[in-house]
Each structure stands twice: as C-alpha cells, then as structure tokens.
C-alpha cells in the first residue's frame, strides 16, 4: 500500500485540496493523510513537493505505432496525396521502424503522460513493442481489404494476428478489433469479424468519414477516390455506403475515428448506438481534412475523445499538444468549458469508450496517475493552464506501479 500526498488532486471532475490517495493496483481511499495512515498503518508515504497536482493518466485511444519512423517521407496538405505517399513509402517506413523505433515512440508517450493507448495494428509488427510497453494497451488488430476475391486470405491473416495478440498474457493488455474504413473493407469481411467481436466481447474501432474523397466515394462512387480505386484495385464502385457500414456496428458501441464529414443521418445513427468519436485535430489539419464539428457533437450529446493518430500524420505523440491545437482550432467554443472537455476527453471519457477501469482519481479505479509540478496555486481556470503550459510530469503511476520518476 502506498499513500501519495499532493497539494491538489484533479479527479478530473473536481479539484480536491490537501487530500491524500491510498492505493495498490487500484485506488483504495482518498482522504486526509492522518485518516489514511490510521487506516493503512504500514503504507509507504510519498510526500510530494509544493504545488504538486495529481491527475488521471492520459489515454490515447488511437495511434499507429508501426508508422513511427516517418519524419519527412510523407506528403501533407491533401488527403489523396498523403495516401499515395503512404503507399509509395510503405515498405521503407515499415522497414525503418524496428522494435527499437516503436519502443521509443511508446516510451515518448509515457514521458508525455500517456498511461493507456489504443494501438491500431495493421501487420502485428508492433505486437512485441506493445506487449513490452509499461502502459495499458488496447491492441486493435486491423482488418482491411475491399476485394471479395481476396477475402479468405485476408481474413486468415487477420485471425492469425488476432490469435497472436490473444496469446499475450500480461496485466493491462487487451486484444481488440479495428475495421479500417467503410471504403476499404468488404462487407463479407466486416460481418465475419463482427461475429468474433460479439462472441468474445472485444472492443471495436474504425476510421469513418475522414475526408471529402471518402464522402463522395461512399455517396456516389465518384470524386477523388474513383481514380484511386480504378487504378490500384480495378474497382469502379464502392463496396458499401456509409449508412450500410454504420448499420453493421449496431449494438457494439464502437469508437469511430475522425468523423469530420458525417452528415445528420449518420450522427443520429451514432447517437442511437452510443458510439464514440475520436478527435485527431493535428492529423486532420496535416491531411487537409475539415475540422470536427464539436459544437454539433455536444448538442447531440455524442461522446468524443482526443487522440494523436500516428506519426504518419503527426509530429509527436503528445496529448497535451493535441489538446492545445484543438483548443485553438475550435475558436467558436467557450474557452474554459472546452478545455475541461478536452481534459475529460483524454481521461474519463476515453476510459469509458474503451471500457477500462481507469481515467479517474476515484476509489475503486485503477491507479493510473500523473504527478504534475505546477508553478503556483491553481485557480478555477486550471484546465486551460494544464493545456497551455505543459507542466513537468515528475511521476507516472500505472496500475499502482511507479513507471516514471523517483519515489
């Protein structure tokens, strides 16, 4: 048993002052230090420095670790140009990112306060790195392939990768399933994969409505994607439309990444099925895609969370940076309430979306916690300052274990 003694605790729903936290793997009790010492007389006490703040560990729900070698190989500014550059440079990027490269990206996330991440794994090259990670990992085995003739081979490969992730036996590692997108996965594959998701109660995610090209292709088999599919895959028509794709996900409470081109009907489907939207502002900007309409999501009470995407469409894996960019992009939102939503979108709301017992400093939750060194006493605008000033993270606890910093 350990008792952590900060000046402040952001739960993140409320700010507590002069309370201590008793924890093992989970948080056992929150209260006055004297009361906790009487309750747990053999507990080790860690007294933190002045103006220390404990908050929940950050949760990065969507990241592509396999593409962490990218620096300047890919083209930014337009989604199709970026996609072509990914295809052109894929082999080099994959070859350049070995275990050391991927482990460095994962360690950088830890340094930035990310205690849980959702790894979108296309080839399982990142399995070992994610297995060895100190963080909690939801390992989304990705299924992709729009050609019916390749369905059996693609599904066999997907099953092999899923089985390999299910063989990982360590605390905080959760096998899961990703359907790449409505334009890139044949309905036969989707339905077969969702049968496994349902039977094994796995978490589910997909890219959805990321670009204008996707919108036009799914609506009418037209637009910028037409040449792409004709040239590379000899396809003249979409394999499903957006409504059909979303209907496959009924009953699953999936995480849908980007969703910047969703229409009213699709948003209503998302509301009805309690899906979550993953907001990746830096990725959207770099690929020339629209900004997510947060105001509309809030009006419809759609849960949204914040993620970095991968280094194929970002320059760092840092949720504080991601929140800052989002804070400035959404200039039509009230500043303080939006900053508070961003904090929740990287903690409690992300945990709820992933079905994990974390994301809050509350009794019974897993002890995934950050210690931040504030410069001064916090005020009512703490959420804004956390995002703007990127305070030093001196300690990181994951499942009660100190994974960064000294005791």
Image (cartoon, rainbow, N blue to C red):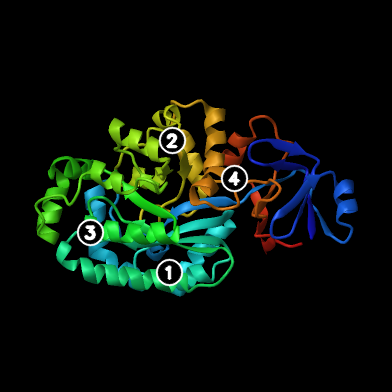
Label placed on residue 126: 1
For marks 3 and 4, the one nearer the N-term is: 3
Q: Nearer the viewer, mark 2 or mark 4?
A: 2
For marks 3 and 1, the one nearer the N-term is: 1
In the figure, 214 relative to 271: above or below? below
- The residue pinned by badge 4 equals 390
CA–CA distance between discs 3 and 2?
29 Å
Left or right: 200 as drawn, with respect to 88: right
Label placed on residue 302: 2
- The residue pinned by badge 3 equals 188
Give the residue drawn at x 76%, y 62%. Answer: 407
Nearest to the observer: residue 102 or residue 274: 274
For marks 1 and 2, the one nearer the N-term is: 1
Quarter-wise, where is residue 291 in the image?
top left
The x, y position of residue 106, in whole percent, is 51, 63
Q: Residues within 10 Å of mark 4 (few under 14, many from 20)?
A: some
Left or right: 186 as drawn, with respect to 233: right
CA–CA distance between discs 2 and 4?
28 Å
Q: Nearer the viewer, mark 1 or mark 2?
A: 2
The x, y position of residue 266, in whole percent, is 30, 36
Label 1: which secondary element: loop
The x, y position of residue 75, in whole percent, is 28, 54
Q: Is the Cβ of the residue at disc 3 closer than 8 Å to that at disc 1?
A: no
CA–CA distance between discs 4 and 1?
29 Å
Quarter-wise, where is residue 164 in the image?
bottom left
Q: Nearer the viewer, mark 3 or mark 2?
A: 3
Give the residue drawn at x 50%, y 67%. Answer: 104
């Amino acid at each position: 048993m350990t008792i952590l003694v900060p000046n402040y605790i952001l739960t993140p729903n409320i700010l507590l002052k002069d309370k201590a936290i008793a924890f093992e793997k989970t948080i056992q009790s929150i209260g006055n230090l004297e009361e906790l010492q009487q309750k747990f007389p053999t507990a080790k006490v860690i007294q933190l420095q002045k103006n220390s703040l404990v908050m929940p560990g950050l949760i990065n729900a969507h990241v592509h670790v396999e593409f962490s070698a990218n620096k300047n190989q890919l083209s930014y500014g337009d989604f199709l140009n970026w996609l072509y550059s990914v295809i052109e440079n894929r082999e080099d990027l994959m070859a350049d990112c070995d275990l050391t490269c991927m482990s460095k990206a994962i360690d950088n996330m830890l340094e930035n306060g990310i205690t849980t991440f959702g790894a979108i794994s296309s080839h399982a090259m990142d399995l070992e790195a994610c297995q060895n990670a100190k963080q909690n990992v939801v390992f989304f085995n990705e299924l992709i392939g729009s050609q019916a003739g390749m369905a059996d081979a693609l599904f066999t490969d997907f099953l092999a990768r899923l089985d390999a992730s299910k063989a990982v036996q360590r605390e905080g590692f959760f096998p899961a399933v990703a359907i790449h997108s409505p334009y890139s996965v044949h309905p036969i594959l989707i339905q077969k994969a969702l049968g496994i998701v349902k039977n094994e109660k796995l978490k589910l995610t997909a890219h959805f409505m990321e670009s204008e090209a996707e919108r036009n292709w799914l609506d009418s088999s037209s637009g910028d994607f037409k040449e792409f599919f004709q040239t590379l895959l000899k396809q003249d028509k979409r394999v499903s439309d957006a409504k059909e794709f979303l209907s496959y996900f009924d009953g699953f409470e999936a995480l849908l990444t980007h969703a910047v081109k969703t229409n009213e009907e699709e948003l209503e489907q998302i509301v009805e099925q309690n899906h979550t939207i993953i907001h990746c502002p830096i990725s959207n900007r770099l690929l020339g895609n629209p900004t997510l309409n947060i105001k509309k999501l809030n009006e419809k009470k759609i849960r949204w969370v914040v993620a970095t995407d991968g280094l194929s469409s970002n320059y760092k894996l840092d949720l504080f940076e991601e929140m800052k960019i989002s804070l400035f992009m959404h200039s039509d939102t009230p500043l303080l309430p939006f900053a508070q939503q961003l904090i929740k979108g990287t903690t409690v709301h992300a945990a709820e979306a992933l079905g994990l017992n974390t994301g809050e400093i509350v009794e019974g939750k897993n002890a995934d916690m950050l210690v931040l060194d504030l410069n001064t006493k916090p005020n009512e605008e703490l959420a804004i300052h956390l995002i703007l000033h990127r305070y030093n993270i001196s300690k990181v606890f994951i499942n009660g274990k100190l994974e960064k910093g000294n005791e």
